[in-house]
Image (spheres, grey):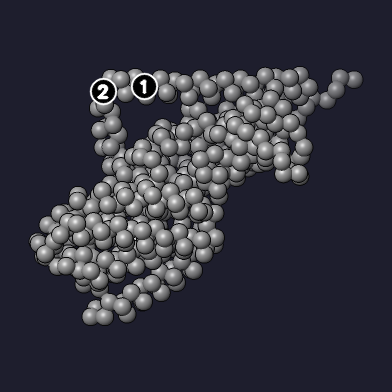
Amino acid sequence: MRRPRLLLLVLVLAACVLIVLDTGAGPDSPFAGARRAADTVLGPAQRAAAGAVGALEGTGDGDSAELGRLQAENARLTGELLRSEAAARRAAELDRLLGVPSAYTTVPARVAGVGAALGFSSTVTIDVGSRDGVRPGQTVLNGSGLVGRTLRVGPFTSTVLLLTDPGFTVGARLAREGTLGLATGAGRTLTYELVEGGRVQPGDAVLTTGSDTFVPDVPIGRVASVDVGSALVTTAEVVPLADVTSLDLLAVVIEPVRSNPRDPLPPPPP
Amino acid sequence: MLGAVVLVGALLTQWAALSRLPLPGSPPDLLLVLVVAFALVAGPAPGTLGGFVTGLLVDLGADHQLGRTALTYTLVGYLAGRVQYGPRRSILRSLLVVAATAAVGVSASALVGLLLGDPRIDLPAYRQSMLSTVPYCVLLTPLVVPVVGFVARRGDLDPLRR
């Protein structure tokens, strides 16, 4: 310990080795055990700390409480409006197809912490984990719309990758037209890329399409601007409905979409 | 022991409160200030080691590769430790050291992320981080340095000291 420069060199090398060992390993990472241990030990403390902070926030004056209530109400109504837009489209399709919108099983969750990585992170920690039925890759939403998907799941807490993170991609469709595309996080907004040609205009609502663990028809956001300049693909900027900077109450959809969600069509009458 | 309590307390404060504050830009980094304050009191070698341990703890709770924050904080701890001033404290000097090392820390973190191909790191993100995290860290300094000084005066810097 007399030679700090040597120590610096050794520790920097050690950190580099850790990074290399942990890169691209995913759930098979040699440090998965250590992470789970840290989640198990720190998770309950984190939940308690978040509760204390939440209690402090609750003691604000009447105006801010009223403001919060109205914001929540507004977010809920906006989400309802979008869902009804999608419902109108779906109703037209129902005339031709037999189908029912699925109902999902969710667990309520509170944000217990926000990822801290010198400002370059777009994750939050929530206070539910594998003991509550949460698995990696599940849909996370709030009253206004999609929030993200679960990334790492500990026994008591889970990490949620927010939809604005550049690593986040989800199948998406326009509520009115049904045009398919992909929505990818882009910092504060998302970039919506049309798979095939199709019309998209500012104000259009964007919903998820769903996959094996992801549920369909969750409102993502509204198109803010369309970029048709780049010849081959039409892209649009989508502002998420959920305000990712002030997340609090969330819901995790813990029941995956069934592989065959609907009964086969009845045979045509003879 | 007291040192470990301070470390875990700071970690929880960072996760539960600081990162959620509705401040413009990136959140403040309490742990970085803690590492700098500790290194200023304890010197380069304990500072380097303390930075590594603290960074590793942060990494365990983060969504990126283990070791990224550890690498950054190790560097920060070493640099801050080089300007060690022992028991004689000057708040202006610690403010300057925090500002300089936080800038180095943000840059190193961005550089490592860039080398690893992290899609979240680009010039606007880096600029935002430099313009918000660094000043926030400086603002935190007057709150953190007395606490670390108190723990140091108790002569109880375990487990970081050795």
Q: Answer left or right for A268 relative to A213.
A: right
Q: Nearer the viewer, residue A14 or B72?
A: B72
Q: Nearer the viewer, residue A71 or A229?
A: A229
- Residues packed near mark 1 inside 10 Å, few (<14), some (14 to 19) or many (20 plus): few
Of all chains, the one bearing label 2 is A
Give the x, y percent position of residue B125: 47, 50
Q: Residue furthest left?
A: B154
Give the x, y percent position of residue A70: 40, 20
Q: Residue furthest right?
A: A270
Task: Please name the residue shown 15% across and 59% down the image.
Answer: B90
Please tell me whether residue A207 is drawn above or below residue B101 in the rendered image: above
Q: Quadrant of residue A249?
A: top left
Read off the residue under disc 1: A67
- Residues packed near mark 2 inside 10 Å, few (<14), some (14 to 19) or many (20 plus): few
Q: Secondary structure at mark 1?
A: helix
Q: Nearer the viewer, residue A216 or A264?
A: A216
Please state, as top left, top right, bottom left or bottom right, where the N terminus of chain A lies in the image: bottom left
Please tell me whether residue B158 is drawn above or below residue B146 in the rendered image: below
**Mark 1 and mark 2 on one chain:** yes
Q: Is residue B93 visible?
A: yes
Give the x, y percent position of residue A263: 72, 29
Which residue type carries mark 1?
Leu
Q: Answer left or right for B66 relative to B85.
A: right
Q: Earlier in the sequence, mark 1 or mark 2?
A: 2
Q: Answer left or right for B97 relative to A188.
A: left
Q: Quadrant of residue A72?
A: top left
Q: Which mark is residue A61?
A: 2
Of all chains, the one bearing label 1 is A
Give the x, y percent position of residue A102: 61, 28
Q: Answer left or right for A191 relative to B93.
A: right
Q: Which mark is residue A207?
A: none
